[in-house]
Image: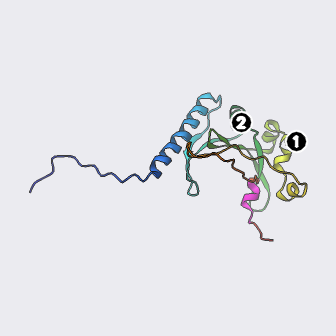
Amino acid sequence: MEQATQPTTATAPNDGRDTEARASYRRARTLVDQLVDQLPTLPNAAEAHRSFALDSYEARLHFGVGQDAGRGVLQTATLVDTEPVREAKHDSRGVLIAYWIGLRTVVDGVPLSAWALTTEAEADRLLPPAATAPAEKTKDTAESAGETTQPMPTVSTNPAAVVAPALTPVRPLAAKSAPETGA
C-alpha cells in the first residue's frame, strides 16, 4: 500500500463573490480598527458583521450599559460626523424600561452602527429630548407634515461600479418591532 508523499490541498473554485466578500470584510474591519484606535471610551464589542440579508459587511460597535457607554456612542458620532438618536425601549406590556442611544450611518461605503443602553435620566443628560424630537416623530406625523428625510450617503460595494445614492426610510427601532398593518 502506497501513501502519498506530497501534501494535497483542496481549494474551492473562486467565483468572484468570495473576493468581493473579503474586500467588504476588510473595509469594515479597517473602519472598526480605526474607530477603536481613536475612541477615548472603548466599546464592549467591535465587529465586522454580515447578516443573512446583506451581501456586504457592516461595522458594529456595542458600548454596553450606562452613561459611560452612552458617551462612547456620542464620541463615535463626533468622529464620523453624524447625529446620534435615542429610542425608547418598552417591555412586552408597553412599560418604558430603558433608552437606546445610538447611530446608524455609512462611512466610506461601510454601514456603521453604534449603540448603548441607558436609563431615561442618563439619556436626558447625554442627549436631551429636545435634541432628538425630530428623530422620535412617528411615520404618520412625518408624512402628514409633508416632511422628507435626508438620504444616506452614497453606498457602493464595488469601487468600479457607478455609485448611486441609497435612499432608506428612517423608522425608529420601536416601530420596526411592531407588526405592520396593510391599509
Camera-side residue of 5 and 120: 5
Tell whether 134 sits left or right of 24.
right
Residue 181, x across and y down, in percent: 77, 69
Residue at x 72% of width, y 43% of height:
102
Q: Main secondary structure of the magenta part?
A: helix
Real-space Cα distance between discs 2 and 1?
18 Å
Q: Quadrant of residue 143?
A: bottom right
Query: Mark 2 or mark 1, which is nearer to you?
Result: 2
Q: Which residue was labeled with disc 1?
A: 130
Tell whether 129 sits left or right of 22.
right
Residue at x 77% of width, y 71% of height:
182
Q: Amino acid at mark 1?
A: Ala
Looking at the image, tell me whether mark 2 or mark 1 is earlier in sequence order: 2
> Is-magenta flag for residue 166?
no
The answer to whether residue 116 of the structure is visible from this angle is no
**Callout 2: helix, strand or loop?**
helix
Q: Which residue was labeled with disc 2?
A: 77
Residue at x 79% of width, y 36% of height:
126
Q: Quadrant of residue 48?
A: top right
Q: Which residues are magenta?
A: 173-179
Against 85, is 179 above or below?
below
Q: Quadrant of residue 152?
A: top right
Number of other residues with Cα within 10 Å of mark 1, as a class: few under 14, some 14 to 19, many 20 or more? few
Against 143, is 5 above or below?
above
- Callouts 2 and 1 close, C-beta under 8 Å: no
Residue at x 72% of width, y 52% of height:
168
Residue 18, x across and y down, in percent: 45, 50
Q: In which quadrant is the N terminus drawn?
A: bottom left
Residue 64, x across and y down, in percent: 65, 42
The answer to whether residue 170 of the structure is visible from this angle is yes
Residue 3, x across and y down, in percent: 13, 52
Q: Amino acid at mark 2?
A: Ala
